[in-house]
Image (spheres, helix red, strand yellow):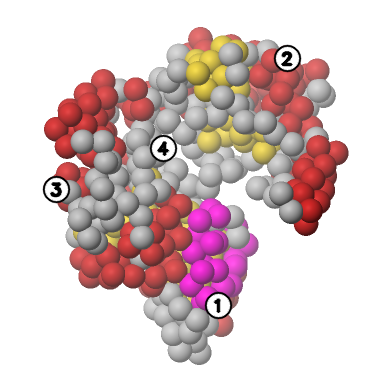
């Protein structure tokens, strides 16, 4: 290793250790379950995005095995050469029907869906107006586009309107972009107001529904459905890696939008397409969402139970409105210690600090799923109370 790189890495890692922010990866042994073994310790798992428990649903497993046996383990090429299989087209047709849009395209991840779409559509002559708490994939896409970026305070519609008014002289395209559900705080974007402002001032509208897909709206169709805004959002991004239980991301919109992304979205152009097993499992998951609504119902039952318990104990859960519920403690080192002591007592809830969130908003982030039992959630609440009192967080 070069001395320059060695000095840089050692210095950066030493800073993390000195601030008690250095983290080793937790290793999952076995499937992603509400009670799982991490680092050879059985714990209640409050850190998974597997909202509906579909990663182990029998219908998804059966579909993946069947597709592997019939179609092989890989596609062998990028989509624009020889890697577009019929099962990919079937999945995109199913997503379009589910989301009630004209067309859709699947990407390798939600991150590449966001970054690839924004950077393809916008250029240096354009303007992006973005919520300050938008996901890193949106931020990276904005930077890659070379467009001018203006940021409005989180969910502040008055400031958003000011920025749109001030953009009247911008010659190029204007895009307003927001998360549907914000991944760190679990709150929901005021989408009706944002859409109305985008329409009033002639801006394109984009929503990243990664944490709303499978969680909000009828059968989990997302925030556009939740607010009844079909036909008024130009670009919808979603994920297949969270509530859907598999892997990937997708973009929904007009047929012209999707055809354009075929030709200009770099992650689509330069990455091998999904293995057949992934596409098949995603197709099966969409059928589960349509035919087994009990999972979504149970997710929200568990969410209400757990949130009520946290509030009763006196934890600061911020503005959360979804299964993502932060416990805000205000210091990065305390958040990491809180997480470690919870883990030692049998609960896995990841500590999160700067730069993911501001230091003053450091937290342990909890996520409940449809497959948690009430006994498991009560055990977690009891441990949270025990450790929270020990560390004087409550």
Q: Which residue is mark 3?
A: 86
Q: CA distance from mark 2 to mark 3?
A: 53 Å
- Asked whether 23 falls inside the magenta stretch, the response is no
Q: CA distance from mark 1 to mark 3?
A: 39 Å
Q: Earlier in the sequence, mark 1 or mark 2?
A: 1
- Report whether 167 appears left or right of 63: right
Q: Earlier in the sequence, mark 2 or mark 3?
A: 3
Q: Position of residue 314 (x, y in %)?
A: 70, 26
Give the label, 4 or 3, closer to the camera.
3
Q: Is residue 314 visible?
A: no
Q: Which residue is mark 2?
A: 386
Bin the neighbour count of mark 1 within 10 Å (Cα to Cα): few under 14, some 14-19, many 20 and up.
Answer: some
Q: Position of residue 5 (x, y in %)?
A: 74, 53
Taking the spot 56% from the left edge, 24% from the top edge, the residue there is 27
Q: CA distance from mark 4 to mark 3?
A: 24 Å
Q: Is residue 117 above or below residue 28?
A: below
Q: Position of residue 173 (x, y in %)?
A: 42, 80
Taking the spot 38% from the left edge, 64% from the top edge, the residue there is 266
Q: CA distance from mark 2 to mark 4?
A: 30 Å
User: Which quadrant of the figure has residue 46?
Assistant: top right
Q: Which residue is mark 4?
A: 242
């Amino acid at each position: 290793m070069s001395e320059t790189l060695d000095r840089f890495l050692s210095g950066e890692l030493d800073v993390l250790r000195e601030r008690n922010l250095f983290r080793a990866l937790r290793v999952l042994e076995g499937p992603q379950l509400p009670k799982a073994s991490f680092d050879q310790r059985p714990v209640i798992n409050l850190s998974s995005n597997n909202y509906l428990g579909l990663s182990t649903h029998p219908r998804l497993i059966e579909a993946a095995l069947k597709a592997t046996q019939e179609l092989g383990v890989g596609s062998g090429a990028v989509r624009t050469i020889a890697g577009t299989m019929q099962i990919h087209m079937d999945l995109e047709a199913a997503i379009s029907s589910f989301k009630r849009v004209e067309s859709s395209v699947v990407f390798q991840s939600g991150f590449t869906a966001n970054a690839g779409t924004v950077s393809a559509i916008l250029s240096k002559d354009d303007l992006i107006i973005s919520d300050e708490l938008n996901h890193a994939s949106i931020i990276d896409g904005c930077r890659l586009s070379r467009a001018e970026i203006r940021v409005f305070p989180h969910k502040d519609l008055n400031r958003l309107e000011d920025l749109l008014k001030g953009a009247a002289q911008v010659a190029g395209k204007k895009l307003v972009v927001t998360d549907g559900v914000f991944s760190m705080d679990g709150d929901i974007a005021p989408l009706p107001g944002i859409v109305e402002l985008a329409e009033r001032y002639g801006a394109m509208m984009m929503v990243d529904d990664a944490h709303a897909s499978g969680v909000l709206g009828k059968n989990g169709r997302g925030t556009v459905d939740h607010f009844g805004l079909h036909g008024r959002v130009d670009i919808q991004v979603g994920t297949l890696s969270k509530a859907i239980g598999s892997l990937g991301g997708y973009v929904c919109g007009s047929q012209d939008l999707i055809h354009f992304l075929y030709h200009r979205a770099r992650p689509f152009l330069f990455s091998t397409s999904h293995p057949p097993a992934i596409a098949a499992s995603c197709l099966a998951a969409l059928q589960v969402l349509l035919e087994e609504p009990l999972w979504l119902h149970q997710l929200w039952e568990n969410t209400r139970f757990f949130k009520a318990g946290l509030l009763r104990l006196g934890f600061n859960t911020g503005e959360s409105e979804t299964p993502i519920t932060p416990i805000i403690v205000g210091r990065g080192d305390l958040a990491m210690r809180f997480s470690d002591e919870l883990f030692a007592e049998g609960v896995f809830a990841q500590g999160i600090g700067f730069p993911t969130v501001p230091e003053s908003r450091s937290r342990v982030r909890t996520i409940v799923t449809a497959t948690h039992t009430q006994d498991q959630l009560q055990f977690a609440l009891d441990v949270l109370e025990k450790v929270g009192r020990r560390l004087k967080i409550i």
